[in-house]
Image (spheres, rainbow, N blue to C red):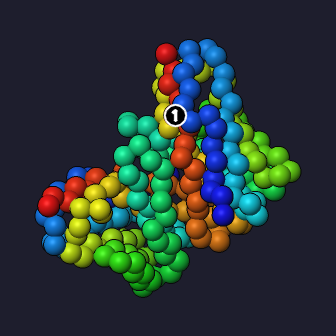
Amino acid sequence: KAGVTQTPRYLIKTRGQQVTLSCSPISGHRSVSWYQQTPGQGLQFLFEYFSETQRNKGNFPGRFSGRQFSNSRSEMNVSTLELGDSALYLCASSLEGWGTGELFFGEGSRLTVL
Amino acid sequence: ELKVEQNPLFLSMQEGKNYTIYCNYSTTSDRLYWYRQDPGKSLESLFVLLSNGAVKQEGRLMASLDTKARLSTLHITAAVHDLSATYFCAVTTGNQFYFGTGTSLTVIP
């Protein structure tokens, strides 16, 4: 059974640019959630999508957005990149979301902003 | 905002010893998770604890939950080197998901 796939794994951008990250969940999973991990702030929840609808949202500025497609694949976008956006971005998939228990995480996309 | 605190933040222990990692959270939560992260890797799910008094065990790890005390523990029995990693607890409440600060565990042969 294929796991959660995130692309790209590594990328380098400059301030002011935008970036799009992709996440393909485990087949049959309808919930995809996104997290940011930095040395200073630790792991923080960004948002959760379920059946193409944003169901939950963390405390991040509007520069961070996402969407989910009909095949459950999800993308997140960060516009007007800042140095502080450098982080490991993790996505997780689950059958029905947090309420069902287990989340399965991808390997992450490591973003460096110069 | 819910706060999740873990202690200790760093733990160095000898192989064969026992130790406990603590996870305290500040308000009522729906469920509690424990994850493991190896350096440069993603998060691996260890346990999901759903109710007061829940106890789960897998190998040398055992997790418990006391919702009245707002406390979860991750107990390590007879540690081995392969358990070296960073361990995170996380809680959900309403529509938010909060991670603890993480405990970096090093098991010394």
* Residue B5 seen in this snapshot: no
Q: Residue furthest front?
A: A1
Residue A46 or residue B61, whichever sits in front:
B61
Q: Position of residue A76 (x, y in %)?
A: 69, 37
Q: Residue at x 55, y 43 (%)?
A: A108
Q: Residues within 10 Å of mark 1 (few under 14, many from 20)?
A: many
Q: Position of residue A64 (x, y in %)?
A: 65, 33
Q: On the image, which quarter does residue B53 sit in?
A: bottom left
Q: Label 1 marks which chain's residue?
A: A
Q: Residue at x 73, y 52 (%)?
A: A49
Q: On the image, which quarter does residue B106 sit in?
A: bottom left
The amino acid at mark 1 is Arg
Q: Residue at x 49, y 64 (%)?
A: B45
Compared to A47, does A88 lie above or below? above
Is A90 placed left or right of B80 in the picture? right
Compared to A8, does A93 lie above or below? below
Q: Position of residue A111 (x, y in %)?
A: 53, 29
Disc 1 marks which residue? Answer: A110
Q: How many marks?
A: 1
Residue A14 or residue B4, whichever sits in front:
A14
- Quarter of the image for the N terminus of chain A: give it: bottom right
Compared to A55, does B69 lie above or below? below
Residue A58 or residue A73, whichever sits in front:
A73
Indicate the secondary structure of the residue bearing disc 1. Answer: strand
* Residue B42 seen in this snapshot: yes
Q: Position of residue B102 (x, y in %)?
A: 35, 53
Is A90 placed left or right of A42 in the picture? right
Q: Residue at x 24, y 62 (%)?
A: B81
Residue B61 or residue B109, whichever sits in front:
B109
